[in-house]
Image (cartoon, rainbow, N blue to C red):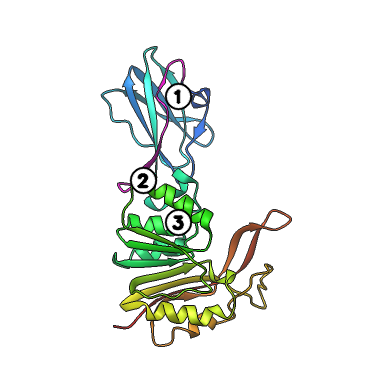
Amino acid sequence: MTDLICYQTLPRWNSDTLPPAWQQPYRTEAGSWAQPKLYKGTLDLALLTELGEITETLTLTADSRPPRLGPEQLHRVTGFSPDMECQLALYCKPEDYYHRRYQLTPTHSEVVEAAKNIPPGRVLDLGCGNGRNVLYLHQKGFEVEGWDKNSDSLNGLRQIIATEALEGIRLQQCDLNQVTIEKQYDFLLSTVVMMFLQPETIPGLIAQMQQATTPGGHNLIVAAMSTPDYPCPMPFPFTFSRSELLGYYDGWDILKYNENPGALHKTDAQGNRIKLRFATLLARRPV
């Protein structure tokens, strides 16, 4: 893959400091690619089957171009010269960069999918939290605003923005139960947020999202439901009922709508992720 991003460079090792774990069967993480680099000497790297059998042994040198080890690739170091010096860089897909580098929750999958087909423009993330969607959309070339009530989340996001020297991101602390959206945006989104708002907020907030959307612009909403087959076990102030969210978007072009079962990150007493239905809508305002 050519669009991978380096999210971590590990310390430079020599023949004395190479981690012992590398000399045992070792697997790259799921969703992560490992790029070895030799500065001096040689290093023999064996690629293994699930049974630990060697399929190929690579002798790496400072002049060679070592292959990038794919996710969950089993391998181990089988030998190296006394003067060996090496380093390992870890790569991931762009949507996973801030998750892996700063331990944020991964970018919401619906945001990743939507951004494939929505051209960069002005975007407002309502309930941006720690910035998982804000940062990804900025990475994709959007001019981003993020609103959230939680000051700790916004301060953490500001620190990431400063560390990465990012420009074109504006943040605002506000209660979504009391906001007024005054500007126009090409893309407005709210993912897994509306269930934390008061029921009387929802009609007006969706109306504001629609009014603030430029002609041809998009709205994306993902929110919890409570249905007879999947009653919501959480004490959320608000959940959508069957077809309720879809009803707000009469007259819009519905690009995606479903009410599929999903799981919260929160777990029950047995350690299982809590399951319920989510209303997922991606709609385009007619031109």
Q: Residues within 10 Å of mark 2 (few under 14, many from 20)?
A: few
Residue 110 image point, x, y percent: 44, 65
Q: Is residue 149 left or right of residue 81?
A: right
Q: Secondary structure at mark 2?
A: helix
- The one of 99 and 256 positioned closer to us in this rendering: 99
Residue 75 image point, x, y percent: 46, 31
Q: Are marks 3 and 1 in contact (CB under 8 Å)?
A: no
Which of pointers 3 and 2 lies earlier in the amino acid sequence?
Answer: 3
Q: Which contiguous range is marked in magenta?
A: 1-17
Pointer 3 residue: 131
Is any part of residue 6 visible from this angle?
yes
Pointer 2 residue: 164
Give the residue type that dot 2 points to.
Glu
Tell me, for residue 77, which label it has, or none. Answer: 1
Q: Secondary structure at mark 1?
A: strand
Which of pointers 1 and 2 lies earlier in the amino acid sequence?
Answer: 1
Q: Residues within 10 Å of mark 1 (few under 14, many from 20)?
A: many
The quarter of the rendered structure image containing the C terminus is bottom left
Foreground: disc 3 or disc 1: 3
- The one of 238 and 151 positioned closer to us in this rendering: 151
The residues bearing labels 1 and 2 have C-alpha atoms spaced at a distance of 34 Å
Q: Residue furthest bottom?
A: 251
In the figure, residue 51 lies in which quadrant? top right
Q: Is residue 131 above or below residue 250?
A: above
Give the residue type that dot 1 points to.
Val
The residues bearing labels 3 and 2 have C-alpha atoms spaced at a distance of 13 Å
Residue 230 image point, x, y percent: 65, 72
Q: Is residue 2 left or right of residue 283?
A: left
The residues bearing labels 3 and 1 have C-alpha atoms spaced at a distance of 38 Å
Is any part of residue 97 visible from this angle?
no
Which of pointers 3 and 1 lies earlier in the amino acid sequence?
Answer: 1
